[in-house]
Amino acid sequence: MTTLGSSDAWRRPGPTAEQRRADVFIGLAVTAVALFNLTLTTSTGAFHLGPPPSWPEQVCWCLAITVPLAVRRRFPLTIAVVVSAAFIVAQVRAAPEMQLATGALFCAIYTAGAWAGDHRRSRQVRAGIIAAMFSWLLLSIGLSIDAVPADAFEGARGPVPPLLAAIVSALLVNALMFGFAFFFGETAWVAARREHQLHEQAEQLRRARDEAGERAVMGERLRIARELHDVVAHHVSVMGVQAAASRRVMDKDPARARTALAAIEQSARTAVDELRRMLSLLRRGTGTDEGPATVGVERVESLLAGARDAGLAARFGVFGAPVPLPDSLSQAAYRIVQESVTNTLKHAGATTIDVRIRYLAQELEVESTDDGRGSRADRPGAGLGLIGMRERVAAHDGTLEVGPRPQGGFRVRARFPLAAQPLCPVESAEAAA
């Protein structure tokens, strides 16, 4: 978009078809009035510039000055130069019609300022035209001084010598008229440029609004995908492990198979409940990121109970004095653990998982480690699971560490900043870890 600091770089678009048609009608109307005024001037014998040329030549000069106005906005600089040149030559030839011709001249100068594409060149051309006009005015005054009759100022009574007063008056009137033509041309061009800038700004705002809407839709889609992934992937993974275990012991240990089937049933009910909650939030059209939290760190123990039912040796520890957590943060911590458990079940081939929640002085730390295949490049996955983790942590200005441990296994550690809390001692063994 063109800025005020680079105003000359903007080029005003040419006239519309409707404006071009209007120029033709205006040019023809001005020409008709000028020819009528020429007839009146000739009829009164008001030949102030001297004996006039022949009638056909008078008509030609009248047409040469006024007809070009029919295309003034299409070729503003050319028309200004043509009208100015015709005006000076018409005065040299003592053409009697100068009233409409003077108006056409000022209109051409105004149009050159208001409609020229190259505004810098427009200023130069208009300045040149005005300089030529004043040069011709001074020359004509100098040539006509000797012809002024002695009784021309017989009734003069002012303190200024009459000839000097007449010269100064002529210069002042022409300066005002040319100055107004130049000024209003500049004003019209600036107004058009500002209108263009407002249009560009409105278009930018419209595009920004559309982009914001698209980002909002994309964000909502990502939120839905993240929730579906968290809810479905975890419970389906648990059900898959438990179904496999049930199939293997169905004949040998029916009681254990029934326990696994009961765990599958419970996981399915939990998944349906969470899906129903999420769909209910979507139907209500809530604008929050997560909606009211129905899961949080207080349910991590029950989450790990499902992992134990799936065959993992799950350990869980809470260190430090628990403090009240915002619902969104508590839910984010729960989802981090849930994703870790899901990936341990799906990818790790692990036998144990250790989950620890630490309430530190200014942070909540959630850590999940296992003894599985920590070197696998796809753990915990470069897809939606890891993206969801990073988004949840970033939403709370936290940090996330994901990767294999030097001693084997895999670690997921998330830290969330908290409001300052009194420092609570942590068990020495835990501090050493």
Image: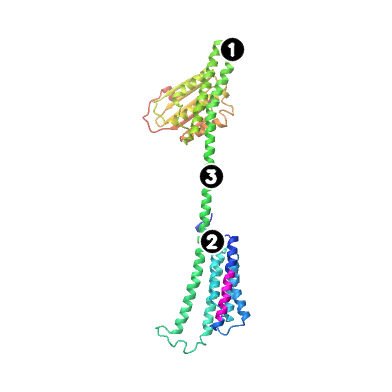
- The residue that label 2 is drawn on is 8
- Percent coordinates x, y for residue 347 in the rendering: 58, 24
> What amino acid is labelled 2 in the image?
Asp
Residue at the spot 48% in from the left edge and 78% down from the top edge:
170
Up/down of 353 relative to 5, above or below: above
Q: Counting residues from the N terminus, which is met first, the one under dot 3 or under dot 2?
A: 2
| Camera-side residue of 48 and 191 | 48
- Percent coordinates x, y for residue 316 in the rendering: 46, 21
Which secondary structure dominates the residues rendered in magenta? Answer: helix
Marking on residue 210: 3
Secondary structure at numbered mark 1: loop
Residue at the spot 52% in from the left edge and 24% down from the top edge:
272
Up/down of 119 relative to 201, above or below: below
Give the CA distance from mark 3 to mark 1: 58 Å
Magenta span of residues: 27-41
Secondary structure at numbered mark 3: helix
Give the CA distance from mark 2 to mark 1: 86 Å
